[in-house]
Image: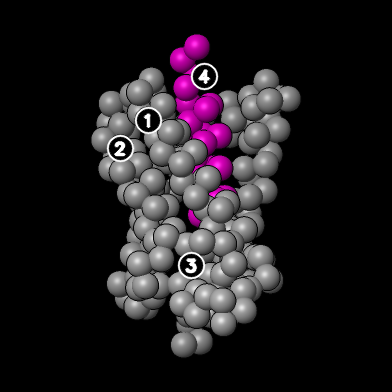
Amino acid sequence: MYYLNLINFLFAIVGLVMLGVTLVLYADYFFGQRTLYRNWIQKFVWHILVATTVSGVAISLLYSEYFGFVPCSLCWLQRIALYPQALFSLMAVKTKESVYYPLYSMALSFFGLAVAVYHYIDQMLPKAPIATNPLSSSILPCLADGSADCGLKVINEFGFVTFPFLSAVMFAFLIILYMNLRKQDV
């Protein structure tokens, strides 16, 4: 399973780079009159949206279907927020529809971000004693159906980069792109 450790490491690096880009884009949006977005991102925004959403779907399916990791209930909620966005982005890229597509996708991304942040906090809190909750290694309630543990860290790079962390970064990245896309026609 050496290649799985390498894949986890590469995804962690990509996630940290995406976090940096996301923070710069938020600063540009609120404090920089969107100059970085207009100069560097705007002409590629549709390709970036498709690449981000479709690769997010592909990565989640890679880990569950190929590597055999069973997604927990909170992971499924994040997937529910992401999967329609991949379809929306593929449909919207042809029409360049920048009114309703970003609005609906932003709502899904806010939901996914909230679930990802809750999931990340759940994973980072100290673990409950086994005697109090033998089915879970987390202290917060997971929508446990018994199939998977929400506290399990499939990816744990640098001590803080986990799947919910990467999911939260991706949703925050998508939100800032949608915000810029909505403002683009104004």
Q: Which residue is mark 3?
A: 150
Measuring from the top left, give residue 92's x and y in whole percent: 30, 32
Left or right, 175 with reference to 89: right
Stretch in magenta? 167-186
Residue in front for this viewpoint, 153 or 39: 153
Q: Disc 3 to disc 4, how far (Cα)?
A: 37 Å
Determine whether label 1 and label 2 are within 8 Å by CB. yes
- Kind of residue at disc 2: Phe
Q: Kindly identify the amino acid type of the residue bearing the numbered disc 3.
A: Cys
Q: Please tell me which residue is depicted at 59% across the width and 67% down the height of the picture.
A: 139
The kind of residue tagged 1 is Tyr
* Label 4 element class: helix
Q: Nearer the viewer, residue 101 or 110?
A: 110
- Mark 3 is surrounded, within 10 Å at the Cα level, by few (under 14), some (14 to 19) or many (20 or more) other residues, namely many
Residue labelled with disc 2? 88
Question: Label 4 belongs to which residue?
Answer: 183
Spatial distance from mark 4 to mark 2, Cα to Cα?
19 Å
Q: Amino acid at mark 4?
A: Lys
Q: Which secondary structure lies at badge 3? A: loop
Neighbour class for label 2 at 10 Å: few (<14), some, many (≥20)?
A: some
Q: Are marks 1 and 4 in contact (CB under 8 Å)?
A: no
Report the disc number at residue 104.
Answer: 1
Left or right: 107, with 159 as reference point: left
Lower sequence index among marks 1 and 4: 1
The magenta stretch spans residue 176:
yes
Kindly report which numbered mark, 1 or 2, lies closer to the viewer in this rendering.
1
Closest to the observer: 129 or 47? 129
How packed mark 1 is, by other alpha carbons closer than 10 Å (few <14, some 14-19, many 20 or more), is some
Q: Considering only order in the chain, which callout, 4 or 3, is on the residue closer to the N terminus? A: 3
Q: Is disc 4 surrounded by few (<14), some (14 to 19) or many (20+) residues within 10 Å?
A: few
